[in-house]
Amino acid sequence: MTPTIKDVAKKANVSIATVSRILNNKPGFTPETKLKVLKVIEEIGYQPNGMARGLINKKTQTIGVIFPNVSNMYSAEVLSGIEDAAHEDGSSVIVCKTDSSMERTMKYLRVLAEKRVDGIVFASEMIKEPFYKFMQDVKIPVVLLSSISYQYPIPYVKVDDRHAAYTATIYLIEQGHKKIAMICGDRNDLIAGIPRVEGYKEALQHSGISVIEDYIINANGFAYHNGQEAMDEILVKKLDVTAIFASSDEMALGVLTTAHQKGIKIPDDFSVMGYDDLKLAQMSIPQLTTVAQPLYNMGKSAASMLFEMIATGEQVQSRIMPHSIIKRDSVKERL
């Protein structure tokens, strides 16, 4: 039979309330009593019921994480940071994949509310009004990750996508490239589409280079196959470019694969630059030059901010994380 808190109290010769205070780090017992209770818990193998403790301290030591996609390396690296922060806090993580579906997102928000999670990390998607209203109604604290809301006062963790794309484009220009194509995930995407295209354009304009709209390829996504299709489009259109800036590493790897299949040499025929600095960027041939987001640290920061909000009940300051250029072998200086 599974030991209960009542069994612990009886064997330790203390009240159930004393055992509860010890389990929840509340005052009202001596160090000797604590040692005695913990020894009994170990001897009889008592496992505190998380939901029962939640009824006492109003917390379940669980957070939810909402992703549009969890099958890529971007999500894996971010989630690793979230998981480590949760482990340090003594909490668990429930991960929900929405496929960017409004219906599925609302479904998972309701599930997380029913599970009484202490907070939610909302990653890589825009907060729509029904999402925000629901979380406000159920009073669940939330932190945005790789996203931002100008409409709602929600703290966020992200890089400055516009500045990062500007930095990447300037780097290519400094290597002697003036004819630079950009593969954007979705030109109408407010999170990672519009800001990165704007950064690319600004870098060209500040360098006295004309923006050619045909050089901007709308790939409708950030996946590997989107990069392959975009590279095919560049070749079919016979765009007179010397460098390609892809707004994700997965797309850049798709470009490298298509180039190899077509007998195109990278970086001799085209220089290629990515965005993210996934672990895969070091595994490609040639290794991928990219603009790095500190993905693990972004995940850990988002979770840490959430735990601070849970503990204090107060809003926290948003964080813009640093980006950097990682120089590898896929970009060649053009003399």
Image: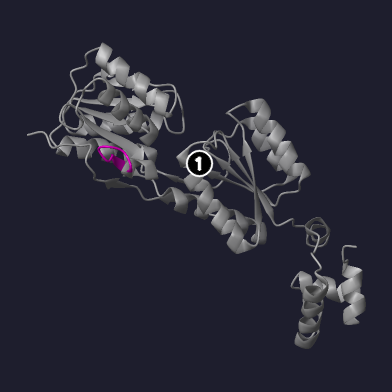
Quadrant of image for the C terminus: top left
Above or below — where is 121 with respect to 228?
below
Residue shown at 35% from the left, 23% from the top:
228
Whether 106 is among the magenta residues is no
**Looking at the image, can residue 288 be seen?**
yes
Task: Count the labels in the image.
Answer: 1
Above or below — where is 93 with respect to 128?
below
For the stretch drawn in magenta, the main secondary structure is: loop
Whether 288 is among the magenta residues is yes
Image coordinates of residue 270 in percent, x first then y, are 19, 28
Binning the other alpha carbons within 10 Å of mark 1 as few (below 14), some (14 to 19) or many (20 upward) gives some
Residue shown at 60% from the left, 60% from the top:
87
Left or right of residue 329: residue 43: right
**Which kind of residue does numbered mark 1 sit on?**
Ser
Quadrant of image for the N terminus: bottom right
Report which quarter residue 95 is drawn in.
top right
Of residues 40 and 323, the one drawn nearer to the viewer in this rendering: 40
- The magenta stretch is 283-290
**Looking at the image, can residue 163 be seen?**
no
Residue shown at 81% from the left, 60% from the top:
49
Image coordinates of residue 313 in percent, x first then y, are 67, 57
Residue at the far top in the pictured view: 236
Image coordinates of residue 180 in percent, x first then y, are 22, 27
Give the structural element (helix, strand or loop) at label 1: helix
Of residues 44 and 141, the one drawn nearer to the viewer in this rendering: 44
Residue shown at 28% from the left, 31% from the top:
245
Above or below — where is 205 with respect to 174?
above
Report which quarter residue 310 is drawn in.
bottom right
Mark 1, residue position: 75
Left or right of residue 17: residue 104: left
